[in-house]
Image (cartoon, grey):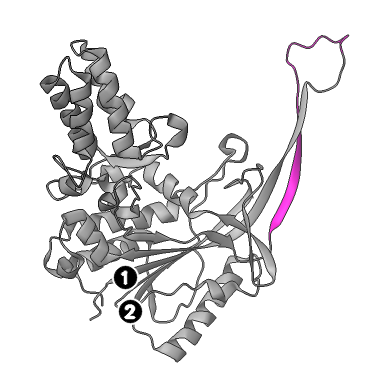
Amino acid sequence: MTTPRFLQIHSLHSYPAALLNRDDGGLAKRMQFGDAVRTRISSQCLKRHWRVAQDEFALHNIPDSIAAIRSRNVVERKVTQPLREAGDIDQAVLDTVESAFNVGVYGSSGTAETGRQPLLLGLPEVEYLREKAAAICAEHPQDADAAKKAADDLFNTRRGEGRNFAAFRDSARLPGGLEGALFGRMVTSDPGANIDAAVHVAHAFTVHREESESDYFSVVDDLQHKDEDAGAAHIGDMELTAGLFYGYVVVDVPGLVSNLEGCTADDWESADKTLAGQVVEHLVHLIATVSPGAKLGSTAPYTCADLMLVEAGSRQPRSLANAFRRPASAQVDAATVALSDYLNKLDAAYGAKEARRVMSVEACEIPQAERICLDDLAAWTAETARSGEAG
């Protein structure tokens, strides 16, 4: 039996005529790999779509999951707005507390919305902040200066109350929400509130050279008279790409159990791993079936994975991206052969020490991997995380 400290999820997805992830110029994101330019999908894009998916395997369909909010306006809209709506607090006091909380949460540049970075806060943390703001306002109903000092002390780790996010995290389950437990977060104003990501997501890229064209389109004015200019009311163009993408995700199982259950990573094997099993089961389904994409209305970029390979093992993970350093044919069978050949080389050099299962639309031969359907693959991955053993 193998101890599954890491779950590695490899995938192949094929998309025709789409614009899955745009750069700041509105073009498809790209990267150079090997001797060829590839189309790319950023990890941020992939994680965003998995986070907000609303299908059967949505993350927040997991029992006991706790949501999170990513925003630059949590203090105004979720902490102080309910207090303003109550109408029984002096506005000068509330304004002072709001300003101090923005600095405490977002850092020294938090007084202006433009200076804040969107921060991920779990609903328990938001509620904690709301309760603290209400308590400060109640204690200093007419004294804005005293309210400011109390608010400043709330976030000060060297004097005063010193009750920062790190202290709160010790007393709450999933303080950063399920998203924080999976994908981590960084809080520049309070390093003690940082959460290390337990799910590591690589940028997906095409296994072949980029395939791109410019799509010219026109728009007709429905109310245009016959005697008016017969030209289009609008003309434009956008880039479309097609590609077969290799994706790679690693689940650090001790880190995931630690983030979910509040234990140390060293104690993961003795902790309750029920929730961790549910999370990875949903994650496998989401990776296989949720498509990223801009221009949804004009490209309908909805496809499912052609191949999903899951490996469970105890040694450091390693991507199979180098199987495609030399551009492969843009065909699933050719990409599968390249991936299998490279995995055989790795096994010959380092030994085959991971347990493997594969789901494939096409017939395939992956070294030492039993071929099963997606439901069984997700269930096997879940049981591997839950039991702490992989066979």
Residue 139, quarter of the rendered image: top left
**Residue 212, image x, y percentages:** 71, 52
Q: Secondary structure at mark 2?
A: loop
User: Does the magenta-highlighted stretch encompass residue 223?
Assistant: yes
Three-letter residue code for mark 1 = Phe
**Residue 133, image x, y percentages:** 19, 27
Tag 1: Cα neighbours inside 10 Å, few (<14), some, or many (≥20)? many
Q: Is residue 163 left or right of residue 227?
A: left
- Residue sitting farthest toward the bottom: 348
- Magenta span covers which residues? 210-228
Residue 252, quarter of the rendered image: bottom left
**Residue 189, image x, y percentages:** 32, 45
Residue marked by disc 2: 315
Q: Nearer the viewer, residue 149 or 385?
A: 149
Q: Nearer the viewer, residue 171 or 36?
A: 171
Residue marked by disc 1: 6
What residue sits 29% from the left and 40% below the top? 121
Q: Which mark is residue 123?
A: none
Label 1–label 2 contact, CB within 8 A: yes
Q: Earlier in the sequence, mark 1 or mark 2?
A: 1
Asked whether residue 173 appears in the rendered view, the answer is no
